[in-house]
């Protein structure tokens, strides 16, 4: 139990569907992240939220839409995805991102395995 | 730009063998360096870290030394166990971001 919970664990969707991934952290952290894990590629940072404000959007296509209503919850809204978007989507949290003294340790959830048909 | 290059897998070893997974980085300044491990069906978790040159991080029998002169942070373990089978990610923290490599899948056979 890492303190970061992701739902659903598995999701299959068609290219015209709209779905959402949810992440919740119980660690009292102020920063939350979405990463994409694809086979044989570096772990790809998608979005960073620090104190509910988006501080990083790593050139992610607009068919991925993040939402961070508070420091404990993070969503990734999905619409009109492509088969190449199939991957494991990992949520993570940390203390204040970029704060002086923060050395970069992240706490990850177990991931949501997304398959786009 | 900044990047991490780690040994391509998969790596398969027998139990009690010596393990090395290479990792080199390209970054400006003096980043903190990490190894994360992902066990089957789980998210990544921090294995060890080093925050300055010549520091050695260690945990669960794994070690890695921050080598500034070779920009490397190779992961080593003297005697691996079946329970060490996992994917290992090298990463560094710089420019307020944690950047990871591709991951190396390690399988230990009894």
Image (cartoon, coloured by chain):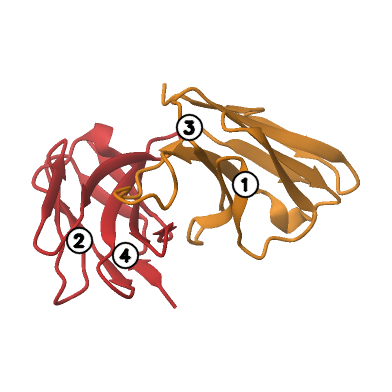
Chain colours: A orange, B red
What chain letter is assigned to the residue under label 4? Answer: B
Between discs 4 and 3, the one toward the N terminus: 4
Residue closer to the observer: A109 or B14? A109
What's the residue at 41%, 65% (across, down)? B95
Callouts 2 and 4 close, C-beta under 8 Å: no
3D distance between C-alphas at marks 3 and 1: 30 Å
Residue A81, horizontal then vertical, whole percent: 80, 52
Question: Are tags 3 and 1 found on a single chain?
Answer: no
3D distance between C-alphas at marks 4 and 3: 22 Å
Circle 4: is it few (<14), some (14-19), or many (20+) Cα within 10 Å? some
Residue A103, horizontal then vertical, whole percent: 30, 50
Residue B83, horizontal then vertical, whole percent: 26, 32
Callouts 4 and 3 close, C-beta under 8 Å: no
What residue sits right under mark 2 in the picture?
B74
What chain letter is assigned to the residue under label 3? Answer: B
Residue B105's place in the image compared with A31, above or below, is: below
What chain letter is assigned to the residue under label 1? Answer: A
- Residue B41 tag number: 3
Residue closer to the observer: B106 or B2? B2
Between discs 2 and 4, the one toward the N terminus: 4
What's the residue at 33%, 65% (across, down)? B6
């Amino acid at each position: 139990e890492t303190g970061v919970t992701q739902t659903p664990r598995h999701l299959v969707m068609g290219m015209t569907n709209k779905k959402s991934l949810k992440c919740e952290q119980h660690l009292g952290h102020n920063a939350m992240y979405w990463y994409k894990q694809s086979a044989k590629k570096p772990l790809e940072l998608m979005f960073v939220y620090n104190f509910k404000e988006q501080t990083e959007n790593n050139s992610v296509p607009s068919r991925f839409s993040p939402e961070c209503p508070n420091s404990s919850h993070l969503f990734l809204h999905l619409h009109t995805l492509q088969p190449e978007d199939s991957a494991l989507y990992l949520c993570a949290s940390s203390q204040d991102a970029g704060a002086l003294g923060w050395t970069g340790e992240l706490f990850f959830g177990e991931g949501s395995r997304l398959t786009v048909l | 730009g900044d990047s991490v290059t780690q040994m391509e897998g998969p790596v398969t070893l027998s139990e009690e063998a010596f393990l090395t997974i290479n990792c080199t980085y390209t970054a400006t300044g003096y980043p903190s360096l990490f190894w994360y491990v992902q066990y089957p069906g789980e998210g990544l978790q921090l294995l060890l870290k080093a925050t300055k040159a010549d520091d050695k991080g260690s945990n669960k029998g794994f070690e890695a030394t921050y080598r500034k002169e070779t920009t490397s942070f190779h992961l080593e373990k003297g005697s691996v166990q079946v329970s060490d089978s996992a994917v290992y990610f090298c990463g560094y923290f710089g420019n307020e971001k944690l950047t990871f490599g591709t991951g190396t899948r390690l399988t230990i056979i009894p």
